Amino acid sequence: PQLDNTIPLVLLTPTTASVSGVAKKTYPTVQAALQNNDNVFFGSFKTYGGTEQNVNGIYSIVDTATIETWYRPDITSNCRIAKANNTAAIITAVIIVDRTKPSP
């Protein structure tokens, strides 16, 4: 990976509990995840601006960002990633791209 300007990131791994027969994911807070040093890793974080949207009368901005880091098998699509020094910014969608294989 091209890891320029790396920053500390924290992995938020959900726990799953059955509530009335339905699986419900619960994510730890950034502060709780930081208590375990295994959750902290370094990577590059780049944003590309946001898209404004108005859904059901609620105005929001959906940002697009790319995080690049070394492979870790514990980072899966159901995880969230947060900047370790900013508890307000949490990335909710993780898409794993293997850049080691050539594209077709």
Image: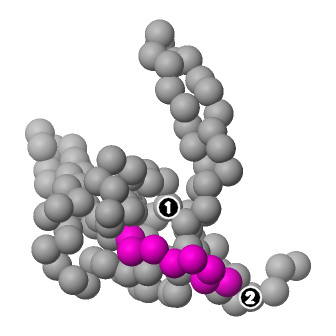
| The one of 87 and 36 positioned closer to us in this rendering | 87
- Magenta span has 7? yes
Viewport quadrant of the C terminus: bottom right
Residue at left 38%, top 81%?
41
Classify mark 1: helix, strand or loop. loop
Q: Amino acid at mark 1?
A: Val
Residue lying farthest to the right in this orientation: 104
Viewport quadrant of the N terminus: bottom right
What's drawn in magenta, residue-wise? 2-9
Q: Amino acid at mark 2?
A: Lys
What crowding class fits label 1: few (fewer than 14 Cα within 10 Å), some (14-19), or many (20 or more)? some
Question: How far across and how far down the image is residue 36, in percent?
Answer: 17, 79
Residue 35 appears in view: yes
Q: Is residue 18 left or right of residue 104?
A: left
- Residue 79 found in image quarter: bottom left
Residue at left 38%, top 52%?
90
Classify mark 2: helix, strand or loop. loop
Q: CA distance from mark 2 to mark 1?
A: 19 Å
| The one of 19 and 78 positioned closer to us in this rendering | 78
- Magenta span has 8? yes
Question: How far across and how far down the image is residue 42, in percent?
Answer: 44, 80
Residue pointed to by mark 1: 94
**Residue 44, above or below 53:** below
- The figure's colour scheme reads one colour
**First in sequence: mark 2 vs mark 1:** 1
Residue 101, disc: 2
Question: How far across and how far down the image is residue 57, in percent?
Answer: 47, 10
